[in-house]
Amino acid sequence: MAILVTGGAGYIGSHTCIELLNADYEVVIVDNFSNSNPIALQRVQQITGKTIKVYEIDLLNELELERVFQENSIEAVIHFAGLKAVGESVVNPLLYFEKNLISTISLCTVMQKYNVKNIVFSSSATVYGLPETLPITEDFPLEVRNPYGRTKRMIEEMLHDVYISDSSWSISILRYFNPIGAHESGLIGEDSIGIPNNLMPYITKVAIGELKELNVFGNTYETSDGTGVRDYIHVCDLANGHVAALKKTIEMNEVGIFNLGTGRGYSVLEVLRAFESATSLTVPYKVCDPRPGDVAIYYADATRAFKELGWKAKKSLEEMCKDAWRWQLNNPNGYLKRKKQSTSSK
Ligand code: NAD
Ligand code: WQD
């Protein structure tokens, strides 16, 4: 039996494939490479010494997708594929509804047809909006603030409805906090296209000299140093969270929602200093206006994932910084030969 990983060539997907292969799962990937490069998958095979089966398919193409279920014995699906750039989703909401919602409907329809009813879904902590208290537990009210977040919330609700209609489905919804870092080999990592929107890839691009300085978005928030606080999680810890969730999804028939974070927040300046200390580099920065839509503090209560999945994040901020830098240094142009151009980074 194999695990189908949609979006398996992407940032989180490629790291998760490594953990799946290391745990002896057979892996089949569906990716249209709209925001990734097949080289990532060659590197996954290089790191693990194992092979994966890859289909270059857009999830919106239901007929092509059926072929994957006909040619393989799929036991469960981990569904990463989708667009993830918040700003882009505000400018082009229909694109996000099409690419995120319709493709998930297409996937679930094919799964149902081929009687594959175990799914682990990549949701996001963004569904919590502006939390009234901290840390954030899974029971907090949801409040979406942009079309990207709305697609995540709508897919969560759709999956609930699918389960209500047929309780032989088993569904894990994983709400990620802020994944950063890279595999310790330095062979795979986050391949941002253009100017990154997110903090860590921006820092590494300043450190390597590609960008002049970090723009710190606001220093008057009610936090220890006035800069925004987030729950950064090493992408390999996050990847392991998927293996833990997958085991539970295959064993049980229920809908589970899990925060995947470390439970601790760091400010922008703390991350910057941690990066400088981990790499012995100096990263120039200037303080700018706050970024519209940003919240001051966001961090997870990850107790449920520990109690029910036996998973918790282990890697330190120092390891996140060291690994992000090793990836950047070894791959100054990411995966180099890009198959297709995409506008979305996050
Ligand atoms: P990514 O863009 O690196 O990976 C997504 C992958 O899906 C890419 O390889 C892309 O080519 C593929 N893809 C996109 N649309 C497709 C389609 N229609 N058919 C087939 N393949 C398609 O993104 P990521 O950072 O690895 O994120 C993975 C998932 O996790 C996404 O659903 C994202 O919304 C979610 N998420 C990410 C973060 C984050 O900070 N990276 C945080 C929370 C949630
Ligand atoms: C982190 C902190 C910024 C860049 C985003 C998405 C979210 C989720 C994860 C998918 C904030 C500050 C950043 C910079 C800065 N993705 N910052 N200068 O905004 O918490 O979450 O990625 O689901 O939906 O919104 O992450 O890395 O952009 O920002 O000062 O150049 O760094 O203000 O405090 P964010 P981020």
Image: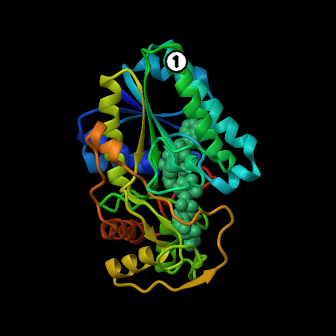
Is residue 274 visible from the viewing direction of this image? yes
Q: Is residue 252 above or below residue 142?
A: above
Which residue ends up furthest to the front in the rendered image? 133
Badge 1 is on which residue?
A: 164
- In the rendered image, which quarter is residue 182 located in? bottom left
Residue 175: % across, % down: 47, 45
> Is residue 338 in view from this perspective?
no
Residue 53 or residue 287, whichever sits in front? 287
Q: Give the image location of residue 8, x and y in percent.
A: 44, 41
Give the image's coloring scheme. Answer: rainbow
What amino acid type is highlighted by mark number 1? Ile
Foreground: 15 or 267? 267
Residue drawn at point x = 49 percent, y = 80 percent: 225
Q: Please tell me whether residue 254 is drawn above or below residue 268 in the rendered image.
A: above
Q: Quadrant of ligand 2?
A: bottom right
Residue 217 pos. (x, y %)? 60, 74
State the residue in front, 134 or 156: 134
**Quadrant of the image containing the C terminus:** bottom right
Where residue 223 appears, as percent x and y from the top left, is 50, 73
Q: How many marks?
A: 1
Label 1 C-beta lies within 8 Å of the nearest ligand 1 atom: no
Q: What residue is at 69 percent from the left and 35 percent from the top?
A: 98
In the rendered structure, the answer to whether residue 26 lies left or right of residue 125 reads left
- The structure residue drawn at horizontal position 58% and vertical position 27%, both measured from the top left corner, is 158
- Residue under the point 58% across and 30% down: 157
Callout 1: SS:
helix
Question: Dot 1: within a 10 Å radius of its alpha carbon, few (fewer than 14), some, or many (20 or more) residues?
Answer: few
Q: Quadrant of residue 257?
A: top left
In the rendered view of the protein, which quadrant contains the N terminus? Answer: top left
> Would you say 27 lies left or right of 287 here?
left
